[in-house]
């Protein structure tokens, strides 16, 4: 089972820096999803920055979300904190 998201920080270029509850730090690129269905709203940078941790994963106000499994498996490890 993959770890839960503890902290989500929006970065430039539609990336998220995710800290998991096992203290791993990863960057997740949202760009490949921006032209798909409900995710098109994330193109608005001020809206993108409204990301929040919810239910062990991330979510935006209009309920766009990514599962913790997607974030963990597709995220790129980041060294340092």
Image (cartoon, grey):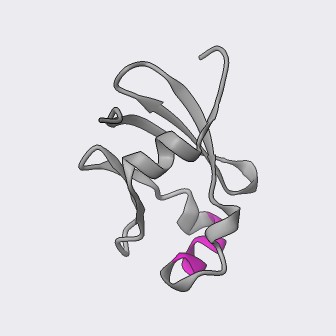
In the picture as drawn, the residue positioned furthest to the top comes out as 80
- In the visual, does 55 lie left or right of 44? left
Magenta portion: prevailing SS class: helix
Identify whether 3 is placed above or below 73: above
- Residue 65 image offset from top left, x and y in percent: 40, 63
Q: Where is the N terminus found, in terms of image quarters?
A: top left
Is residue 43 highlighted in magenta? yes
State how many labels appear: 0
Instruction: State the residue at coordinates (73%, 50%).
Output: 12
Q: Where is the C terminus found, in terms of image quarters?
A: top right
Identify whether 55 is placed above or below 72: below
In terms of image quadrants, where is residue 34? bottom right
**Residue stretch in magenta:** 39-45
Is residue 28 highlighted in magenta? no
Instruction: State the residue at coordinates (47%, 30%).
Output: 19
Instruction: State the residue at coordinates (67%, 17%).
Output: 79
In the picture as drawn, the residue positioned furthest to the bottom comes out as 37
Residue nearest the observer in this picture, 71 or 80: 71
Residue nearest the observer in this picture, 10 or 24: 24
In the picture as drawn, the residue positioned furthest to the left comes out as 55
Res. 64 visible in picture: yes
- Residue 73 image offset from top left, x and y in percent: 52, 42
In the picture as drawn, the residue positioned furthest to the right comes out as 13
In terms of image quadrants, where is residue 80? top right
- Residue 27 image offset from top left, x and y in percent: 62, 39
Res. 44 visible in picture: no
Instruction: State the residue at coordinates (66%, 80%).
Output: 35
Residue nearest the observer in this picture, 25 or 52: 25
């Amino acid at each position: 089972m993959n770890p839960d998201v503890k902290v989500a920080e929006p970065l430039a270029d539609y990336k998220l820096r995710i800290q998991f509850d096992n203290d791993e730090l990863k960057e997740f690129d949202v760009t490949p999803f921006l032209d798909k269905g409900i995710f098109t709203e994330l193109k608005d940078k001020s809206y993108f920055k409204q990301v929040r941790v919810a239910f062990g994963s991330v979510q935006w106000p209009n309920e766009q979300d990514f599962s913790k499994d997607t974030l963990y498996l597709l995220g790129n490890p980041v060294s340092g904190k």
